[in-house]
Image (tube, rainbow, N blue to C red):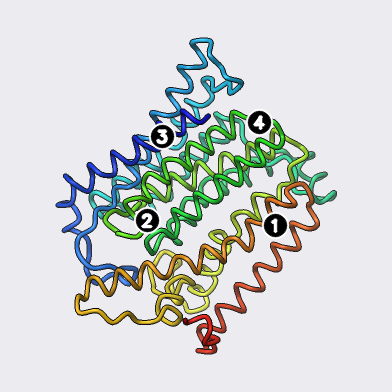
């Protein structure tokens, strides 16, 4: 597991460095006045391509190692290759958007949907239970409902990560924390193969983050967000499906921040009569940047913007830990996990309204 992670880390780190060195020119085509832009200069968004290369090298090496007879109790067989193929439509579509800026939202939704269909039809992933007796009885009577939930999760989570990918180190650190939490619970139930895949995903994320935070010389782009979303969705569903002792609300609480950010964004846009596909600057992390992170006084405008950008992510890291910590502690206790999900939603809405109404306590701005 360790050597696979080292391969994943160094390939992603080296590939990211090559992107920064040789492919900066393509970033000149990015729009300068889009609402989600909070940086200065031309920064390449091909971190997803570097992470995909690191992940592919690590997973394929694990498959070869198992086929050669050196299983190391990991058993990374052909099913890992199927996972890799499953994530390709979504990730390659995201990379195409990062390169051209011409792939419509609808096309990207279709491509993540293709990955979701492969996950359900080819990998056989489905949500077998929801932790409530009447719902579990319904899923047992109509298994297609569990497949539908899995389809929605794999297709939707990549876009949830794309929404929170707004500042240096934000989405990457959230993904790294979630992957390590999934790996921890997988080890608790004896699933070393799934843990290895999650640790490898955390490793490629760490290799990318060395270029993304705090220097901000490389972004994950849509390709990176989609990679995190698809891999984490596959692992979350597989963990619940393989191990009855793991509550289905464990991954729900683990991912409640990006999931609720997405649902709340859809609600507030529809309430304003705006299409959910239209980008704006009213996401939770953007409000923190504008109204909590204090201005930095520096002669260089680009340096000033970078310093404020870097100060935003730690607020959200701490906010994410409010859900990750109880999820890891109570991964088999459905009632407690459901209660924490509800508590997080209440805290999120309360915090959002507080920031919008300019009622932020002074100590949060220090």
The mark that comes first in sequence, 1 or 4, is 4
- Provide residue 250's location: percent of width, then percent of height: 69, 50
The mark that comes first in sequence, 2 or 4, is 2
The mark that comes first in sequence, 2 or 1, is 2
Q: Quadrant of residue 303?
A: bottom left
Give neighbour class at mark 3: few <14, some 14-19, many 20+ (Cα, 10 Å).
many
Report whether residue 107 is seen. Answer: no
SS at badge 3: helix
Q: Residue furthest right?
A: 133
**Placement of 352 over or under 170, stated as above or below:** below
Q: Which residue in the protein does label 2 denote?
A: 105
Whether residue 76 sits left or right of residue 94 in the image: it is right
Q: CA distance from mark 2 to mark 4?
A: 36 Å
Q: Which residue in the protein does label 4 denote?
A: 191
The mark that comes first in sequence, 1 or 3, is 3
Observer-nearest of 127 and 80 = 80
SS at badge 2: helix
- Residue beneath the point at 58% across and 39% down: 235
Q: Which residue in the protein does label 1 denote?
A: 326
- Provide residue 289's location: percent of width, then percent of height: 41, 75
Whether residue 135 sits left or right of residue 87 in the image: it is right
Report whether residue 159 is seen. Answer: yes
Whether residue 165 sits left or right of residue 268 in the image: it is left
The mark that comes first in sequence, 2 or 3, is 3
Give neighbour class at mark 2: few <14, some 14-19, many 20+ (Cα, 10 Å).
few
Q: CA distance from mark 1 to mark 4?
A: 21 Å
Residue 8 got which mark?
A: 3
Give neighbour class at mark 1: few <14, some 14-19, many 20+ (Cα, 10 Å).
some
């Amino acid at each position: 597991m360790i050597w696979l992670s080292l391969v994943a880390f160094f390939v992603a780190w080296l590939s990211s460095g090559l992107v920064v060195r040789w492919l900066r020119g393509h970033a000149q085509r990015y729009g300068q006045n889009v609402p989600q832009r909070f940086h200065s200069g031309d920064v390449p968004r091909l971190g997803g391509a570097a992470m995909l290369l690191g992940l592919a090298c690590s997973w394929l090496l694990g498959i070869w190692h198992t086929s050669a007879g050196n299983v190391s109790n990991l058993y990374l067989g052909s099913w890992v290759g199927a996972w890799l193929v499953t994530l390709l439509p979504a990730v390659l579509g995201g990379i195409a958007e990062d390169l051209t800026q011409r792939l419509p939202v609808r096309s990207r939704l279709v491509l993540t949907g293709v990955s979701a269909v492969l996950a359900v039809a080819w990998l056989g992933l489905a949500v077998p239970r929801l932790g409530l007796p009447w719902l579990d009885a319904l899923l047992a009577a109509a298994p297609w409902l569990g497949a539908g939930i899995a389809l929605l999760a794999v297709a939707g989570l990549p876009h949830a990560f794309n929404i929170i990918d707004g500042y240096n180190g934000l989405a990457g650190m959230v993904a790294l924390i979630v992957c390590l939490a999934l790996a921890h619970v997988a080890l608790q139930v004896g699933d070393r193969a799934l843990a290895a895949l999650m640790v490898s995903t955390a490793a490629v994320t760490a290799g990318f983050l060395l270029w993304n935070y705090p220097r901000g010389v490389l972004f994950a782009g849509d390709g990176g967000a989609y990679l995190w979303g698809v891999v984490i969705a596959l692992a979350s569903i597989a963990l619940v499906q393989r191990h009855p002792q793991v509550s289905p609300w464990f991954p729900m609480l683990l991912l409640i921040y990006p999931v609720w950010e997405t649902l709340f964004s859809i609600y507030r846009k529809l309430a304003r009569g705006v299409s959910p596909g239209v980008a704006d600057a009213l996401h939770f992390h953007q409000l923190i940047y504008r109204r909590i992170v204090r201005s930095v006084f520096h002669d260089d405008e680009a340096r000033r913007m970078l310093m404020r950008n870097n100060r935003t992510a730690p607020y959200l890291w701490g906010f994410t830990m409010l859900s990750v910590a109880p999820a890891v502690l109570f991964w088999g206790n459905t009632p407690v996990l459901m209660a924490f999900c509800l508590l997080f939603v209440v805290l999120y809405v309360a915090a959002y309204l507080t920031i919008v109404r300019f009622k932020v306590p002074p100590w949060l701005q220090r």
